[in-house]
Structure formats: structure tokens, C-alpha cells
Image (spheres, rainbow, N blue to C red):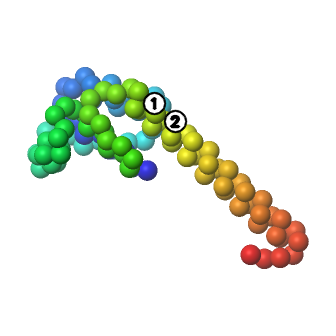
Amino acid sequence: MTITVFTKPQCQQCEATKRRLRDRGITFETVDLSENPATLKQLVQAGYRQAPVVITPDAAWSGYRPDLIDQLAGALATADTATDTNANANADTQSALAIDGNRA
């Protein structure tokens, strides 16, 4: 899952957002809007007026939003648990088939 944080220099809300994402164990990419004027223009045209802008596969927001970061962390934890459960179920199925002498 790609998460991108669009920031600007000396932005306290940007730093707080990145810090909270890191504290929650969320991996993200950072784009400095002062070095990417075309991207800044696109975000403004999309209606964003405040940094940071956070884009995830399922959501987007601007400003420091600890509530949405925590929600994202919860969703990622749930997705990781589901992935682990499915991987374990697949491994168990493969083991059972191997024991029975059957091959998938």
C-alpha cells in the first residue's frame, strides 16, 4: 500500500503528520511541494489548500489529522492480520494435502 505525504518546508503540521505516521509504524513516501511545483498545482486544482496532503489508496486529506492517521493504522493492522491468517490457512491446507499424499 502506497501512502504519500505532500509537504512543504518548515511546516509544523507536516512534521506532526510524519511523526505520527512513523510512531504508528506506517511506511510512507514524502514529496516536497517546494521542489515539485507541477504537483503543487495539481493538488491546488484538486481543491487542497493546506499542507500536508496525505494520499492513501482509500482516502485523502489535508492538514494534521491524528484521527485519520489512527484510523489508517487500524485498517493496516486489520489488513495485516487478515493476510497472516490467509497465509497460515494456505500453509495448513498445503500441509494437509502433503500428508494425505495429494498434491494441489
How crowded pointer 1 is (Cα within 10 Å; few <14, some 14-19, many 20+) is rated as some
80 displayed left or right of 91: left
Alpha carbon of mark 2 to alpha carbon of mark 1: how far?
6 Å
Q: Which mark is residue 40?
A: none
Q: Secondary structure at mark 1?
A: helix
Residue tagged by mark 1?
70
- Residue 64 shows up from this direction: yes
Residue 84: x percent and y percent? 64, 50
The correct choice, above or below, for 83 with respect to 63 in the image is below
96 displayed left or right of 13: right
How crowded pointer 2 is (Cα within 10 Å; few <14, some 14-19, many 20+) is rated as few
12 displayed left or right of 44: right
Q: Secondary structure at mark 2?
A: helix
Residue 37: x percent and y percent? 11, 45
Q: Which mark is residue 74?
A: 2
Q: Contact, CB < 8 Å: mark 2 with mark 1?
A: yes
Q: Identify which residue is drawn at 78% across, 59% down.
A: 92
The correct choice, above or below, for 100 with respect to 10 in the image is below
Q: Which residue type carries mark 1? A: Asp
Q: Identify which residue is drawn at 62% across, 48% down.
A: 82
Tell which of 81 and 60 is nearer to you: 60
- Residue 22 shows up from this direction: no
